[in-house]
Image (spheres, rainbow, N blue to C red):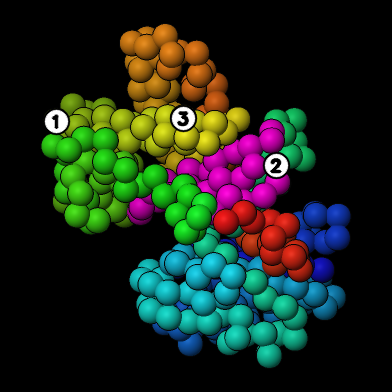
Amino acid sequence: MRAGLDIGGTKTDAVAVDSAGEIVARVRLATGWGADAVVRTVLEAVRLLGDEVDEAIDSVGIGIPGQVEPGTSRVVHAVNLGVEELDLAAAVEPALGAPVRVENDVNAAAFGAFALRSVGAHGSRSMAYLNLGTGIAAGIVADGELWRGARGTAGEVGHISIDPNGPLCRCGQHGCIEALAGGGAIAERWGRPGALPVRDVFDAADRGDLLARELRVGLARGVAAAVRVLVLTADVDVVVLGGGVTALGPRLMADVSDELAASAAASPFMRSLHLEGRVELLPAGSPAAALGAALIGADRDQGALTHG
């Protein structure tokens, strides 16, 4: 029995996966703030899963925001969790009595999304998972293996500048994909209170608000640019969109499709790539990141799952 955890800034999603790869239990709980609280969250999530399945947990995989140093379980700069540095496996393995592996949350989601597609009718040899959340990042899976790149930055498309005259990005460049399409950047530029600022922007754009229209166009432009980058550089079969911003569903997809169609109309080469047909949404509520973490945690040979 394998446990997989997706640790988010406010909640943790955890699943138990059996030897056939089926999810047999799922629990959700609030994520604590700070390193000690994150450790307690992990221990509680695994305990709850063990109670649900009434079996011992044989391995634990954890997907977590921040940088995970390659080949280790050391997490650094997980600012949304209040964690500056934490060796997560070292902190929880003694109490869990099971091996623990730690992965960046976007990579875990990419691996889980690939697994979900492979068991359905849309299996493919390669896939990019584009996470549209507070920031923008992607994970790439080819032939069932995560691709990290030489220094672990494969898929970091959020900080590719597509408009030198565009808005300032937190990385210091102007016009980055993340500055246009990241939920945090959109909320900051919108500057109005609301629980779901990106949805508010779409609603206001429908009412004719000029700033909202500008932000909405920029969002579609940024996502479409990320799709083009992922296909043109990695030539993946499909780009799966996930993350909080995708809660907009068909409204988002329609805008992105229009943007991709416009570039195809202007370029026979872009038209030959059939980009509109190579983009899809991760189903709402999918436990992709937790599932991916469980599968990664169960693999004893890290090289079988990752390149780079």
Instruction: Name the residue at 70% across, 42% down.
Output: 143
- Mark pair 2, 3: CA separation: 18 Å
Q: Check the image and report above or below for 154 versus 229.
A: below
Where does residue 69 sit, x and y in percent of width and height?
A: 50, 70
- Where on the picture, by quarter, is residue 277? top right
The three-letter code of the residue at mark 3 reads: Leu
Which residue is pictured at 48% across the width and 87% down the height? 36
The kind of secondary structure the magenta stretch mainly shows is: strand
- Name the amino acid type tagged 1: Leu
Query: What residue did someone put label 3 on?
Result: 232
Image vertical order of residue 107 relative to residue 64, above or below = above
Q: Which residue position is annotated with label 2? A: 143
Circle nearer the viewer, 1 or 2: 2
Give the secondary structure at mark 1: helix
- Residue 155, given in percent of the width and then of the height, sits at 46, 47
Which residue is at 56% across, 45% downward? 140
| 221 vs 152: above or below | above
Helix, strand or loop status at disc 2: loop
Quadrant occupied by the N terminus: bottom right
- Determine which residue is flagged by label 1: 210
Within 10 Å of disc 3 (Cα), the crowding (few <14, some 14-19, many 20+) is few
Q: Is residue 139 magenta?
A: yes
CA separation in Å, label 3 and label 1: 33 Å
Whether the residues at callouts 3 and 1 have beta carbons within 8 Å, the answer is no
Is 276 or 282 nearer to us in this picture? Answer: 276
Q: Is 298 on the left-hand or right-hand side of 182?
A: right
Visible residue check, residue 177: yes
Which mark is first along the chain, 1 or 3? 1
Query: Tag 3 or tag 2, which sits nearer the N-term?
Result: 2
